[in-house]
Amino acid sequence: MTGESTPLPAGRRPPLAVRALRLLWRLATDRPYRNVMYAFWFRPKAVFQPFNDTRAERYPVIFGLVQSRLGKDSAVRILSFGCSTGEEVVTLRRYFPHAFIKGIDVNPGNIAVCKRRARRSGDTRLAFETASSTAAEPSAAYDAIFCMAVLRHGAVGAAGVTRCDHLIRFEDFAATVAEFDRCLKPGGLLAIAHSNFRFGDTPTAAAFTPLMSRPPGPNTPLFGPDNARLEPAERVDVVFGKRR
C-alpha cells in the first residue's frame, strides 16, 4: 500500500454503502490497487509476497555482479520470478541488451501490464507469463534467475511475530528454490534478495556456492526451517553460483 491513515472514530465513519461504493470505484479505476487486492482475496497457491512494491534499478550491485559474470553482450537466458509490473525486466534489459528475458508473476493483472509494456517497446526477446512457480519451465533453461523481494511477507515483520507459518512456510520456500535449481544451467547464477528465509538452510544449497552477501533488508526478519524467528543477522547471502 502507498501509505497509512488514522482510522476515523466509529461514529464518524461513512455509512457502509458509501464505503462499499468507494471500494468499488477504486477497484475500477486504480489498477495497482486492484492487482494487490487480487492477491489478498484469491490467495493464489503458494503465494508469498502479496504486494506489488517495485521500481527500476532497485538492485544495481546485484545486477552488476551477474552482468560481470555472464557478460553484458552475451545472448543469455534470464528469468525474473515475481516480476510484478515489469520494472525489473526493463532494468535487466539495460544490463543484458542481447538476452532473452522472461518474467513470471502469480498476478494476472501484473502480467497484463508487462505484456502491454513489451508490445509498446517492440522488444521481441521479452516474454511474460502468469504462473506461481517455475514448474512449467524447461530444465536447465536459464543462465540466471532473479527472485527479488518475493519470497517474503511484509506482515511477518510486525512486532511480536515469532513464527511465520500462518502466512508463509519454509517448506514452500524450499520447494520453490528446488525448482529454480532444476531450471538453471550448470554454472548458472541465482539471486535471492529480501527473503524471510535463508537459501543456505535448504537441501538445494548444497549444489551452489555463495558469491555475494549483504545486510538483510528492512522489515525482513529471518525464519528457520521450523518457521520460527531467528536472531537478527548482520549479513545474508544473496547471490549463488550453481556448480558445474
Image (cartoon, rainbow, N blue to C red):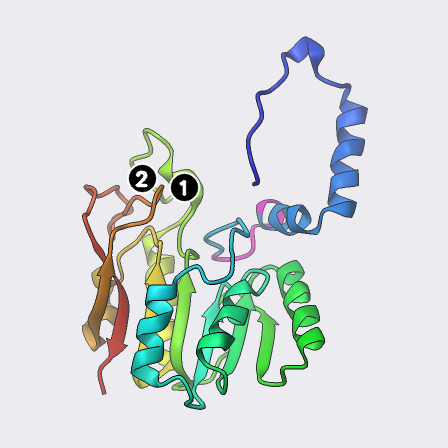
Residue at 37% of width from left, 73% of height from top? 180
Residue 81: x and y, percent? Answer: 47, 67
Residue at 38% of width from left, 40% of height from top? 156
Span shown in magenta: 40-46
Tell me if mark 2 has few (under 14), some (14-19) or many (20+) residues whose alpha carbon lies within 10 angstroms of its own: some
- Numbered tag placed on residue 166 in the rendering: 1
Residue 241: x and y, percent? Answer: 25, 77
Residue type highlighted by circle 2: Arg
Residue at 40% of width from left, 51% of height from top? 152
Within the magenta stretch, is there residue 151?
A: no
Q: Is residue 161 left or right of residue 91?
A: left
Q: Is residue 99 positioned above or below 206 on the image?
A: below
Q: Are marks 2 and 1 in contact (CB under 8 Å)?
A: yes
Q: Is residue 80 positioned above or below 28 on the image?
A: below
Q: Is residue 147 positioned above or below 126 on the image?
A: above
Residue 154: x and y, percent? Answer: 43, 43
**Quarter of the image where the N terminus is located:** top right
- Numbered tag placed on residue 178 in the rendering: none
Q: Is residue 55 positioned above or below 230 on the image?
A: below
Helix, strand or loop status at disc 1? loop
User: Depth check: 161 or 46 in front?
Assistant: 161
Q: CA distance from mark 2 to mark 1?
A: 8 Å
Residue 86 falls in image quadrant: bottom right
Residue 175, visible in the rendered structure: no
Residue 236: x and y, percent? Answer: 23, 56
Helix, strand or loop status at disc 2? loop
Q: What is the total number of numbered labels drawn onto the structure image?
A: 2
Residue 115, visible in the rendered structure: yes
- Label 2 belongs to which residue? 163
